[in-house]
């Protein structure tokens, strides 16, 4: 039997983000402190069989889309066979991945064969030196190879995620959009979110209004899109999409300046099996015991109960000490 998760405000929750690892081969300045975050012990992290069991509970509860993220999901050994096993067990659930592209050169072709619905690729600059600066250890050429491999592989719905940061890439936004459009990628700009208080700085933040006026200066008028207008071509979700006169789309995720809490349909599960009803809230429900004891009824109830804590709306003061890499962005 299929149940549905609804939170106390009646929001139907049908989208889950699962972090498959807290490890990452980058240390992006907007995501982590300089020395990274202390890694969890290996036995604290959900095994792949645990994640499949968790997905059974989520599927029973009406979740229809799962995004696998991290940390960097492609650094976890066995990720591609795991995704294949996931699709074999849950063919009706749409599966997607968020990645920093560094390992796509190695994995894109195999990933294309597992039936992902799409991938999101982080791309904050096109300049190799700035790339090294923002990721603290990444190599632009390797990420570009990864993007090329993804494009050649036939993986559908490839989007780019860019976090505009004042003084870093604000002058590059039009270039990044042009790069994405020229390569058939759908670009999205994500407001810099205050997750992990030691990383975010107000003076580095650029809000949606300023982002849009920069884009209008470069590309001319932008028309807001609705799913109807775009004839199903644009994904539903927290991004607001805009189209320029040449028919090119860009998404803006204004998580800070204009909350999309009213329509938020998602839950998050950290790599250690903590349910997080809201990205900006510290409330967590530990699921790992129920997952490891394979208590399906107990797990479904804990998820439903935990989702009652989903706040009605975002409150910055609730944001905790965890960074995006811990939570699963
Ligand atoms: N490592 C993968 C990657 O970078 O794509 C997946 C995990 S990462 C945490 C997921 C997304 O979160 C990335 O697109 C990244 O840009 C975004 N992100 C991380 N910290 C952020 C922050 N403070 N504000 C906005 N987006 C952030
Ligand atoms: Fe790693 Fe992604 Fe965070 Fe960058 S944004 S440090 S790639 S988890």
Image (cartoon, grey):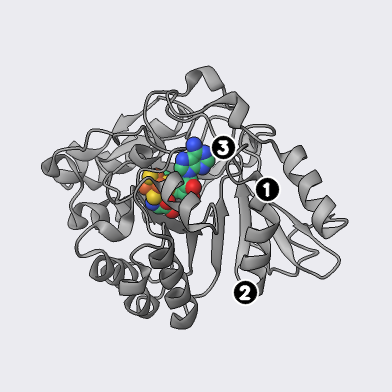
The quarter holding residue 34 reads top left
At mark 3, the secondary structure is loop
Q: Is residue 119 visible?
A: yes
The percent position of residue 228, horizontal first and vertical second, equals 78, 63
Foreground residue among 215 and 322: 215
Mark seen at residue 184: 2
The percent position of residue 259, horizontal first and vertical second, equals 65, 34
CB at mark 1 closer than 8 A to ligand 1? no
Residue where numbered disc 3 is placed: 192
Horizontal side of residue 106 vs 279, given as left or right: left
Q: Is residue 17 visible?
A: no
Horizontal side of residue 296 vs 195, given as left or right: left
Residues at marks 2 and 1 touching, judged by CB atoms closer than 8 Å: no
Q: Earlier in the sequence, mark 2 or mark 3?
A: 2
At mark 2, the secondary structure is loop
Query: Looking at the figure, which quarter contains the C terminus?
Result: top left
Mark seen at residue 73: none
The quarter holding residue 314 reads top right
Marks 2 and 3, how far apart at CA: 25 Å
The residue positioned 20% from the left and 57% from the top of the image is: 48
The residue positioned 87% from the left and 57% from the top of the image is: 220
Residue, far top: 317
The quarter holding residue 145 reads bottom left
Q: How many marks?
A: 3
At mark 1, the secondary structure is helix
Residue where numbered disc 1 is placed: 171
Neighbour class for label 1 at 10 Å: few (<14), some, many (≥20)? some
Query: Looking at the figure, which quarter contains the N terminus?
Result: bottom left
Q: Earlier in the sequence, mark 2 or mark 1?
A: 1
Q: Earlier in the sequence, mark 3 or mark 1?
A: 1
């Amino acid at each position: 039997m299929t149940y549905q998760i609804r939170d106390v405000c009646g929001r139907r929750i049908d989208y889950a983000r699962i972090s498959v690892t807290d490890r990452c081969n980058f240390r992006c300045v907007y995501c982590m402190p300089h020395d990274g975050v202390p890694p969890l012990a290996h036995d604290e992290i959900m095994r792949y069989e645990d994640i499949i069991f968790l997905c059974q509970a989520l599927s029973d509860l009406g979740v229809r889309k799962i995004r696998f993220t991290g940390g960097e999901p492609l650094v976890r050994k066995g990720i591609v066979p795991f995704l294949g096993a996931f699709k074999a067990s849950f063919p009706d659930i749409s599966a997607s991945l968020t990645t920093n592209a560094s390992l796509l050169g190695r994995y894109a072709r195999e990933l294309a064969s597992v039936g992902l619905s799409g991938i999101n690729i982080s791309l904050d600059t096109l300049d190799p030196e700035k790339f090294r600066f923002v990721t603290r250890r990444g190599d632009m050429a390797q990420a570009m190879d990864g993007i090329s491999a993804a494009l050649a592989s036939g993986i559908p719905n490839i989007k780019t995620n860019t976090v505009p940061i004042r003084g870093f890439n604000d002058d590059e936004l039009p270039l990044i959009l042009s790069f994405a459009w020229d390569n058939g990628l759908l670009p999205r700009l994500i407001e810099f979110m205050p997750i992990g208080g030691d990383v975010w700085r107000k003076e580095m933040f650029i809000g949606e209004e300023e982002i849009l006026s920069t884009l209008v200066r470069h590309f001319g008028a932008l028309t807001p899109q609705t799913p109807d207008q775009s004839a199903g071509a644009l994904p539903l979700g927290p991004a607001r999409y805009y189209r320029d006169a040449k028919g090119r789309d860009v998404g803006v995720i204004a998580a800070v300046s204009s909350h999309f809490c009213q329509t938020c349909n998602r839950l998050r599960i950290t790599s250690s099996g903590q349910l997080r009803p809201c990205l900006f809230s510290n409330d967590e429900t530990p699921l790992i015991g129920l997952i490891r004891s394979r208590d399906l009824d107990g797990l479904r109830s804990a998820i439903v109960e935990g989702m009652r804590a989903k706040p009605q709306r975002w409150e910055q003061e609730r944001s905790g000490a965890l960074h995006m890499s811990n939570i699963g962005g």
